[in-house]
Amino acid sequence: MPRRQVDFVPGHHYHLYNRGNNRQNIFFERENYLYFLQQFRRYLVEDTLDVLAYCLMPNHYHFLVRLRSQTLSQQMQAFSLSYTKAINRRYGRCGSLFQGRFRSIHVNCDRYLLYLSRYIHLNPVAAGFVEAPEAWEFSSYREYVELRQGTLPKLNPIRQDVGTAEDYQAFVLANAVRLPKLSHLMLDE
């Protein structure tokens, strides 16, 4: 396979995402989402990265992360393989679950973190699954607006730019209608 265009540097932020092979679902029931997050924590969060924001959608996922080590590619490969094997075993399927290896974008501006978190948290709204981001269970938005006390996302790097939970919620909702299409982040290309 060709070499990655993005170099992974500890201390830097990245948007990690991937979707199902042939745009098919990667989550089939609630337990799949929970298992995915459990495995992500096991393979990546313990030693490799900090999660700032995330959203799991039926056929794709988004993570905004800060790297702590240079082993991201290897850990993501192990994680993806582990999840794919579990799903294949559970549903009697075979073959790849994901459309190739994960994709990544280097986030080189702190201000961009805030806007990217909004994009990630508004994914279920934009897709028409829910009317408000807090209604989607499989995103870190509920932690940001203090509706859930989860331990996966680290809120400070993003919340420091807007302040309180109410300020973050106002930022996300006030701009939801005017959210520009970020074509390089969209998974419909």
Image (cartoon, grey):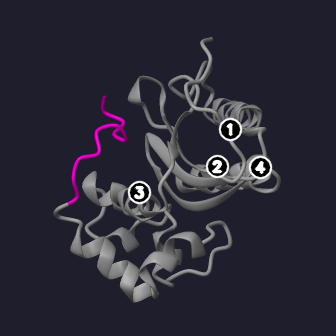
Which amino acid does the dot numbered 4 rest on?
A: Thr
At label 4, counting other C-alpha atoms closer than 10 Å, the crowd grade (few under 14, some 14-19, many 20 or more) is some
Q: Earlier in the sequence, mark 2 or mark 3?
A: 2
What residue sits right under mark 2 in the picture?
36
What residue sits right under mark 1 in the picture?
83
Label 2 to label 1, Cα distance in Å? 7 Å
Label 2–label 3 contact, CB within 8 A: no
At label 1, counting other C-alpha atoms closer than 10 Å, the crowd grade (few under 14, some 14-19, many 20 or more) is many
The magenta segment is: 179-189
Q: Earlier in the sequence, mark 4 or mark 2?
A: 2
Label 4 to label 2, Cα distance in Å? 16 Å
> Residue at the top extreme?
1
What residue sits right under mark 3 in the picture?
116
Task: Tell whether 146 sits left or right of 187.
Answer: right
> Residue at the right extreme?
47
Label 3 to label 4, Cα distance in Å? 21 Å
**Residue 28 visible in the displayed image:** no
Which amino acid does the dot numbered 2 rest on?
A: Phe
Label 2 to label 3, Cα distance in Å? 22 Å
Label 2–label 1 contact, CB within 8 A: yes
Which amino acid does the dot numbered 3 rest on?
A: Leu
Q: Is residue 133 above or below residue 16?
A: below
Q: How many marks?
A: 4
Q: Earlier in the sequence, mark 1 or mark 4?
A: 4
Label 1 to label 4, Cα distance in Å? 18 Å
Q: Residue at x 41, y 23 (%)?
A: 22
**Residue 66 visible in the displayed image:** yes
Residue 29 position, x and y percent, is 52, 50
What residue sits right under mark 4 in the picture?
48
Residue 34 position, x and y percent, is 63, 57
